Structure formats: C-alpha cells, structure tokens
Amino acid sequence: MMRIEEIRNLCEPEFSQERNKELCLKIQYIDEGGIFRIDRDIFAKNYRLNPLECLDVALEKIKSNDVGFKNRFSSNFWPGDKMFSRDFSRSIIICRGKCNLDRAFTTIMRHSDKICLMNHHPKTIFLLSDKWNNETFKRYEKSLLEYTLRHNVWYIFLLVTMYGYTQIPFLPNDREKLQNLRYEEIEDDY
C-alpha cells in the first residue's frame, strides 16, 4: 500500500517548469511573456515543493517586502503593495488560505480602476488562486468585460492545486479577438 505523499513524490519532476510549458506558450502573447516569470520564479523555483507550497513561499516573500523577489516580476502584488503604489501595468493577485475570492475580485476591480488610466500597453492582471466559485465570478464578470473592451485590461485566472495550475477560461488568449467589440454595449443575460 502506498501513501498519497509517496505517489506525489513520484510526480515531483513533473512539477518543474516543463509541466506548464504548453499553457505558458498559449498565454505568453497576452502579457509579453510575464507568465514565464510567474511559472519559473513562483511555481518552479523549488521543485521539492508542490505548487500550493510554492504559492505560500511567494506570499511570505511578498508580505515580508522582499524587494528582490518583487523586482523580478516588474509587477504590483497583492497582498503586499499598498494600493498598488508602483506604476506597473502588470499585477499579480494571490488568493490563498483565508483570503476569499470576493475579496480578491474587489481588489482586482480597485486595481482595474487605477491601471485603466495608465497609458501602458498591455495591461494585465493575473489571479493566482486556490479556490474558484462561479457565483462569485458572475458578480464581477460584466465589469471585467467592460474593463477589457474599453481599457484593454486583460485578466488571466490561474487555479492552483497541489498538482499544478491551470487556466480558468475567461478571455481568449489573443487580445485581437475582441478588438471589434471595443465599443459594444454589454447587457446582462437575463
């Protein structure tokens, strides 16, 4: 009989950067390859840790204000950066542990307000989360779409588990696909 941990240890080499190479290649054009830095410096940095543990290590570095860690990304971080004080067009929001998805989306909305005024291109917000709830997402979906169509703010949602991470489909991995909808009015489905 084998314990789950023993089986997980057999998967360890698969937790390396190569595991998500295909996903990173799909996402890379949205944010000029920022996903590769996230994959390398958060998820594949320590192959002895599973992806959730890697996310915990990143959170510790962010909360302790590890400037070297933060500067590798040229990004704002939450939690960690007070009101996203740095002028970056990329942000990384981490929803893990006691943080709930509603709080993370509220933060995303506040930050979207701020970066939509920037002249930077592209503007991208990554959500790295160990939880997902469709009902919570639906409350923010219309506003997120409006930020995308009006201000070219792109959202990449990654669901992180002990075994890896995957993209939660929301927007296409091609900014050009919604170009023709830029001034389209969005109405609720009901």
Image: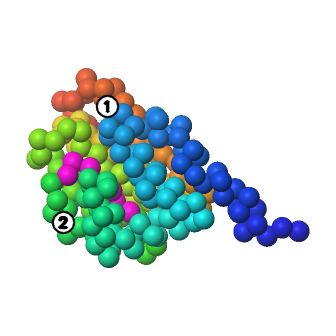
Q: Magenta stretch: residue 136 in it?
A: no
Q: Amino acid at mark 2?
A: Met
Residue numbers of the magenta segment:
88-94
Pick out the residue farthest to the right. 1
| x then y, percent, for residue 132 | 48, 58
Residue 184 visible somewhere in the drawing: yes
- Secondary element type, mark 1: helix
Towards the viewer: 50 or 109: 50
Q: Main secondary structure of the magenta part?
A: strand
Q: Position of residue 144 (x, y in %)?
A: 28, 46
Answer left or right for 75 relative to 97: left
Vertical placement of 82 versus 24: above or below? below
Mark 2 or mark 1, which has the lower sequence index? Answer: 2
Q: Residue at x 83, y 67 (%)?
A: 2
Q: Amino acid at mark 1?
A: Arg
Please provide percent x and percent y for residue 50: 58, 63
The verdict on residue 91 being magenta is yes
Q: Is residue 99 left or right of residue 116?
A: right
Q: Quadrant of residue 81?
A: bottom left
**175, above or below 144, in the image:** above
Residue linked to disc 1: 175
Q: Quadrant of the C terminus?
A: top left
Judge the density around disc 2: few (<14), some (14-19), many (≥20) Cα neighbours within 10 Å: some
Residue 83 shows which numbered tag? 2
- Packing grade of label 1 (10 A; few <14, some 14-19, many >=20) is some
Counting from the top left corner in percent of width and height, residue 86 is at: 17, 59
Residue placed most toward the observer, 129 or 189? 129
Instruction: Point out the residue furthest to the top here.
Output: 180
